[in-house]
Image (cartoon, rainbow, N blue to C red):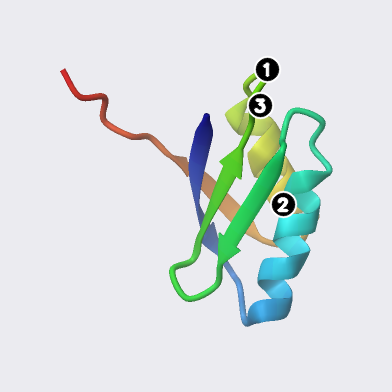
Amino acid sequence: MMKHLRISGMTGAYSADTIKNSLEMVSEVDSAYVNYEKNSAQVNFSGLEPSDEVLINAVKDAGYTAEVIKEERKK
């Protein structure tokens, strides 16, 4: 499963690496992919779902801001 985040404040590839490392420190996160050009992150998890607050705080701890992108569920 995955969650998507919109990231603000990145200035280059180093920013993306910093955010990726911070997100991957969250125990529920298996992996993270951060795209500097799209100001976004994808967080992958297979067990317990990380809370939005925990993910946002992980990005904040890295020095950036984030919001979880709520995806519309198909009916």
Image point 62% across, 21% down: which residue?
49
Specify the label residue 16 is tagged with: none
Specify the label residue 60 is tagged with: 2
User: What whole-number distance in Å separates the C-alpha atoms at marks 3 and 2?
Assistant: 15 Å
Q: Position of residue 7 (x, y in %)?
A: 54, 59
Q: Quadrant of residue 69?
A: top left
Q: Regarding mark 1 in the picture, which secondary structure is present there?
A: loop
Image point 52% across, 35% down: which residue?
2
User: Which is nearer the N-term, disc 1 or disc 2?
Assistant: 1
Residue ranking furthest to the left: 75
Q: Position of residue 53 (x, y in %)?
A: 64, 31
Q: Residues within 10 Å of mark 2 (few under 14, many from 20)?
A: some
Going by the image, does 39 lie left or right of 19? left
Labels 1 & 3 near each other (Cβ < 8 A): yes
User: Which is nearer the N-term, disc 3 or disc 2?
Assistant: 3
Disc 1: which residue: 48
Q: Residues within 10 Å of mark 3 (few under 14, many from 20)?
A: some
Q: Position of residue 59 (x, y in %)?
A: 69, 51
Q: Is residue 63 visible?
A: no
User: What whole-number distance in Å separates the C-alpha atoms at marks 1 and 2?
Assistant: 21 Å
Going by the image, does 67 lie left or right of 32? left
Q: Is residue 33 visible?
A: yes
Q: Amino acid at mark 1?
A: Leu
- Indicate which label's residue lies in the foreground, 1 or 2: 1
Disc 3: which residue: 50
